[in-house]
Amino acid sequence: EADIYQTPRYLVIGTGKKITLECSQTMGHDKMYWYQQDPGMELHLIHYSYGVNSTEKGDLSSESTVSRIRTEHFPLTLESARPSHTSQYLCASSILGQGVSEAFFGQGTRLTVV
Amino acid sequence: GENVEQHPSTLSVQEGDSAVIKCTYSDSASNYFPWYKQELGKRPQLIIDIRSNVGEKKDQRIAVTLNKTAKHFSLHITETQPEDSAVYFCAASLGDDKIIFGKGTRLHILP
């Protein structure tokens, strides 16, 4: 079934560790996004991509990086996790080139940095 | 860049009554205005959207109106039910540009 998948769903990690949050979609979408969201709160755009080898920073300052080597895969890496990174991270994707299109969200990764 | 303001941040309505959530946007060139619903512990999902060449769109109990001159759009939910309780996000975008979300409205349906 075409969907957008995030792993892990939950992660508890120590301060200073490097972590990568995985996001994959099987919908053939070119546009992909990463949002940070405290439960039920505002969606903060941290990174987005229009396709392979395209990455852009969003509005939220973050010590994270992304890569887009394959269309279906858009991992998010935190080089050195801090307690302030504790949050939920949502990945999303949408079609490019049709002017307007629905964004589909993954289930999210809930990250706790201790 | 685009900025989307959403009001109110919290809304409580009696079951069966109507709920209205309002948003304004800053970029007059924006041409797509989706609304997402996020239930507790779940991912946001699109419930209705409207393009700039349309003034109103309705889907059963949900309707969205757009006033391009005022750069204002609203979500209307009629005959509210307990399952309408959720956080609702409005958004705006221009063509293939990034989607900008409002800060969300927490809707409580009171029994």
Image (spheres, rainbow, N blue to C red):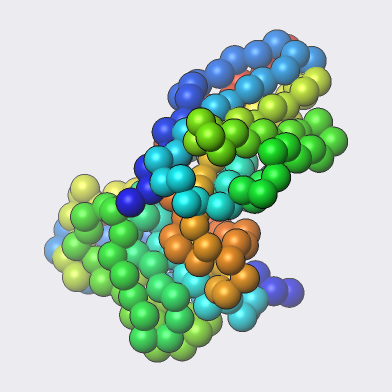
In the picture shown, does residue B69 fall above or below B17? below
On the image, the x and y values in percent for residue A78 come to 24, 67
User: In front: A83, or B31?
Assistant: B31
Residue at 67% from the left image edge and 20% from the top image edge: B19
On the image, the x and y values in percent for residue B60 come to 84, 36
Q: In which quadrant is the N terminus of chain A drawn?
A: bottom right
Q: Quadrant of residue A13?
A: bottom left
On the image, the x and y values in percent for residue B2 come to 38, 48
User: In front: A31, or B64?
Assistant: B64
User: In front: A56, or A80?
Assistant: A56
Residue at 45% from the left image edge and 39% from the top image edge: B25
On the image, the x and y values in percent for residue A72 come to 52, 82
In the picture shown, does residue B86 fall above or below A82? above
Residue A16 in the figure: left or right of residue A78 = left
Q: Quadrant of residue A77?
A: bottom left
Residue B66 in the figure: left or right of residue A21 = right
The total number of labels drawn is 0
Residue A81 in the figure: left or right of residue B53 = left
In the picture shown, does residue B10 fall above or below B105? above
Q: Decide if residue B104 is in sight here.
A: no
